[in-house]
Amino acid sequence: MADTQQILEGSCLLTTGEAIDEKGLMIAINTGTGVAMKASDAASRRVVGMNKEVALIGDTEFVVNRGIYVFDNDGTNPLAKDDIGNNCYVKDEKTVDKTGGANLVVAGKVIDVTTEGVAVEI
């Protein structure tokens, strides 16, 4: 995967609910507890941004950046140019797809689809 590209951003501070040991991941908030976690197709998850720093479980000043970022396009349910403007869904913390999994966790709006990946506005 290429480095996550920043296009536009804002940020918020959250407490981590798990160790986040890699930069450039989609980060979700657990809507039941309010803690930040790696994005996944799990119940009670809402994507809130991307991380530029790693964090340990329980860190209380974890910065989550909002904006437009490029993530991997899933090979099974890939997005295409005609998906621009539609929602895309979390496959995992690095990958988005067109149809979503069992929990339909929205990653954000598709801004562009290129050979580099999918530009997603979170």
Image: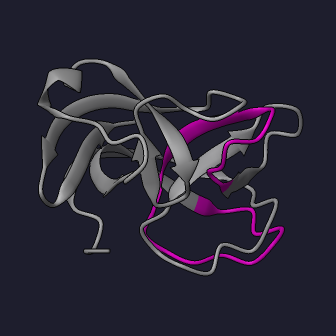
Does residue 53 belong to the magenta stretch? yes
Measuring from the top left, give residue 122's x and y in whole percent. 39, 36
**Quarter of the rendering occupied by the N terminus:** bottom left
Does residue 16 belong to the magenta stretch? no
Q: Is residue 15 above or below residue 20?
A: above
Residue 17 as seen in the image, left or right of residue 20: right
Residue found 66% across the figure and 72% down from its top: 20
Q: Is residue 79 above or below residue 104?
A: below
Looking at the image, the residue that sits furthest to the right is 33
Q: Is residue 46 above or below residue 9?
A: above
Measuring from the top left, give residue 7's x and y in whole percent. 17, 50
Quarter-wise, where is residue 111 in the image? top left
Measuring from the top left, give residue 98's x and y in whole percent. 40, 32
Measuring from the top left, give residue 100's x and y in whole percent. 55, 32
Nearer to me, 98 or 76: 76
Nearer to me, 77 or 96: 77
Residue 59 as seen in the image, left or right of residue 64: right
Q: Which residues are magenta?
A: 38-62
Q: Is residue 11 above or below residue 83?
A: below
Residue found 63% across the figure and 35% down from its top: 101
Quarter-wise, where is residue 17 in the image? bottom right
Residue found 25% across the figure and 74% down from its top: 2
Nearer to me, 41 or 34: 41
Residue 92 as seen in the image, left or right of residue 75: right
Q: Which color mode does the image show?
A: one colour
Judged by its main secondary structure, the magenta piece is: loop
Looking at the image, the residue that sits furthest to the front is 76
Q: How many marks?
A: 0
